[in-house]
Image (spheres, rainbow, N blue to C red):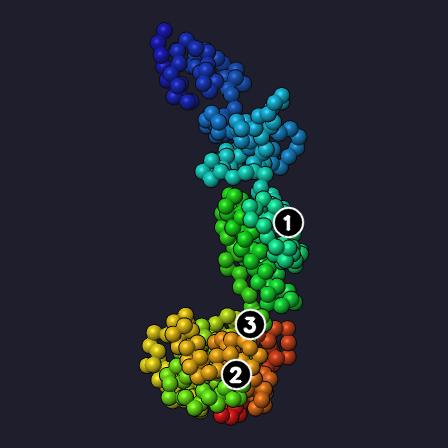
Amino acid sequence: MSLITCPECDHTVSDKAVACPGCGYPISGHLPVATAIISRKPPIERRRPKLPNGYGSIKKLSGNRSRPYAAYLSTAGYTSLPHRTTPPAIGYYKDWHSAYLALGEYHRSPYDPKTKDYTFADIYTLFYRSKFEQARKPFSLSAKQAYSAAFKNCEVLHNRRFLDIRKAEMQEVLDNCDLGYSSLCNIKKLFNQMYRFALENDISEKNYSQFVTINQEDDTEKGEPFSQEELDILWKNKKDPAVQMILIMIYTGFRIRALETIELNAEELYFKGGVKTIAGKSRVVPIHPSIRTYALRFRKNFPHFRVENFRKTFFYPTLERLGISVTANGKKHTPHDCRHTFSWLCDKYGVDDLSKHLLMGHSLGKDVEKAVYGHRTFEELRTEINKIKV
């Protein structure tokens, strides 16, 4: 007897063997051709690797199924007395190798299989319980009600699988909401905190809420305009660079934050910039004749303008020195009062409503007539802002 190589699978077999034990190929001289064909085993379509201990298991389920192969995690950690608990399937697949790849993906980035089908409402319930019911510090009733109200305003997402939700769907919730700015902030805050909870608990791998924006004017920015008497005091001290900056804010309507990045066109005499909303960003505001000189040199006076530095070092000390830091109602003037003053001046001197909205960067919201058909040329805006008298 000697060893030979099987011509079919290259296994080493005895020359006395009837057929190759590995693949069933008939060894020459021992089986008739017809018998050899019948005895040959069907070829193995694809060799299945052996699953390591603790890796999990793959089972083919009975019945006529489009995805008959179920991938299960290891039973370790899923035992209880007196009966063993079957681990949940991480998914169902059309063939064995797809199930094997799914197990490999799980072991590369483990997750709780039970959470992959959680809805938006399920995640909210878990988040709410973690934040309020299991928290060490107490929360006010108003805080709980704010989150509950925000959740109710997301009803369209309640039954959506959380892992399927994308930025566009959350953005649509905010854009279609008729509530005020503070309510939209609460909804966006809810999105942010739910995704943070999902990331911390390995439910989600990406935070889509970070891309969501509020495209509505902030209607909660409280303030009180400077009175005419206070404006007169500012004009009497117009040689002070800090006063000149305050006058620029008053006669342009820009928020103080916009002055950090605002662009000056010295030839055509306008400012371009803005913050907050889409309507407010990169808007063009013609320079009022009364502040033309100050506008042309404001970068020279404040080459490294920073909001917090200007507030503490110039704005508040200047108003206190001039005796106008407090309003007639006993409230402290803030930089945002300059924007309120611009709005008041527009109303006082008859600047038309559409021009005022465009100059201040207000969102026209659901006013279709203004949003679609409301247009003003640059010269028309200049004519309107020049109506304001000093």
Please state the horizontal and vertical placement of residue 63, each as a whole percent of the image.
Answer: 66, 30
The residue that disc 2 covers is 226
Q: Is residue 67 shown above or below 76?
A: below
Q: In which quadrant of the rendered image does the N terminus lie?
A: top left
Which dot, 1 or 2, sits closer to the camera?
Answer: 2
The quadrant in which residue 352 appears is bottom right
Please state the horizontal and vertical placement of residue 204, each as a whole percent of the image.
Answer: 52, 47
- Marks 1 and 2 sit apart, C-alpha to C-alpha, by 47 Å
Q: Which is nearer the N-term, disc 3 or disc 2? A: 3
The quadrant in which residue 91 appears is top right
**Dot 3: within a 10 Å radius of its alpha carbon, few (fewer than 14), some, or many (20 or more) residues?**
few
Q: Nearer the viewer, residue 350 or 305?
A: 305
Residue at image position (56%, 68%) is 215
The local secondary structure at tag 1 comes to helix
Q: Tag 2: residue type?
A: Phe
The residue that disc 1 covers is 121
Residue at image position (52%, 17%) is 39
